[in-house]
Amino acid sequence: MASVTYKNIVKKFGDATAVDDINFHVEDKEFLVLVGPSGCGKTTALRLLAGLEEITSGEILIEDRVVNDIAPKDRDIAMVFQSYALYPHLSVYENMAFGLKLKKTPKDEIKRRVAEAAEVLGITDLLDRKPRQLSGGQRQRVAVGRAIVREPKVFLFDEPLSNLDAKLRVQMRAEISKLHQRLQTTFIYVTHDQVEAMTMATRIAVINKGKLQQIDSPQNLYDHPDNLFVAGFIGSPAMNFFSAHLRKDGGNLLVDSGDFTISIPIESAKKYEKYTGRDVVFGIRPENIHDAHFTPPNIHGENVAVKVDVTELMGNEIFLYLVSGKTTFVARVDPRSTLRVGEGAQVMFDMDHFHIFDAQTEEALR
């Protein structure tokens, strides 16, 4: 097995910088997910590790070996692509065995590895079929199986589930997580879907415009985002943001958005008093906004007057799209809520869970 290290990695395509001075370390047997919007540089970062793109500057290490000038076939990695890239004229068995045959692996060893991978992935009964006879999920398993049989030090996944329907994506997420637990190998996985990242990763690296924004465990990213981008990207529905001003009124520290004013609890206010007078962005997640009639006990709640714009009934919860002044935001409320479109209402902000960011730098204020 192997660790992976990116040291000051830069990749330019002409005048465009796709990866901008990225540094991070992936531990042996870790499941790291690179996540970010389309075009942010996450796939380029993966392709640099695979040797499919040439590094402009910096070093990539697998274990303690710099691999910048080592051919892809000699890096001891295996990559699963977004497209299945299966040979249509070959059977599942032949597709999975193809790379091993090129390396002149003995036939008995090929048979053993393919059989073991097929059993792990639940495709033993599909080995004689051609790709056209398989469903999308089955083809994706074959693509993963082709990587498994190589028994590499590092597995690379480039958005492998994006071509699957929603139900199958959920199923394959669980299967890839179980596969990681079973193989105990280093996984580096690229996706633009933050739900995939949150549910699968040991750690998540958030990338935007070629720069690493934050790398941490899923829960820490969710609870303690370093900046406005990470806060808005991680979480579904996304965090709500309000342009506001911090001001004092007597002994109270207030968040004044112009449309509403709410008080910060005394315990938290101590941390933010030094920012009094500053323009900020106030952030609160949808699950921390409640119908005032169904508010959890023992929270520091602040009432905000709103108008209900849209309701989405989800069965176990309701999404309310609310308007305060010119700002629209989302609340995730108790399914017993009776608020309806067009009504004026009171919602409760849970001030035990909120975020404040500097309006200029967009960095979190701690």
Image: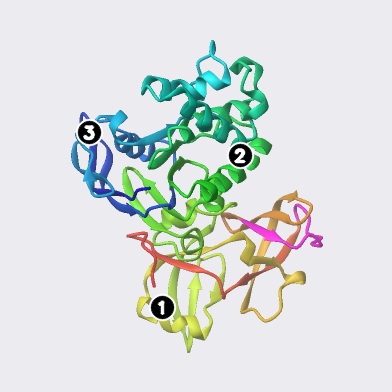
Residue 312, magenta (yes or no):
no
Image disc number at residue 272: 1
Quarter placement of the C terminus: bottom left
- Residue 354: where, in percent of width, then height? 52, 69
- Residue 295 vertical placement versus 104 (above, below): below
**Kind of residue indicated by mark 3:** Ile
Q: Which residue is mark 3?
A: 70
Q: CA distance from mark 3 to mark 2?
A: 32 Å
**Kind of residue indicated by mark 2:** Met
Q: Of label 1 and label 2, which has the lower sequence position?
A: 2
- Residue 147: where, in percent of width, then height? 46, 32
Image disc number at residue 354: none
Q: CA distance from mark 1 to mark 2?
A: 44 Å
Outermost residue toward the top?
A: 89
Q: CA distance from mark 1 to mark 3?
A: 51 Å
Count neighbours of disc 2 (C-alpha within 10 A) and say few if under 14, some if 14 to 19, many if 20 or more: some
Count neighbours of disc 3 (C-alpha within 10 A) and say few if under 14, some if 14 to 19, many if 20 or more: few
The residue shown at (50%, 32%) is 113
Left or right of 68 in this view: 155:
right
- Residue 24: where, in percent of width, then height? 31, 53
Left or right of 324 in this view: 45:
left
- Residue 302 vertical placement versus 10 (above, below): below
Magenta highlight: main SS: loop
Q: Of label 3 and label 2, which has the lower sequence position?
A: 3
Q: Secondary structure at mark 1?
A: helix
Q: Which residues are magenta?
A: 330-342
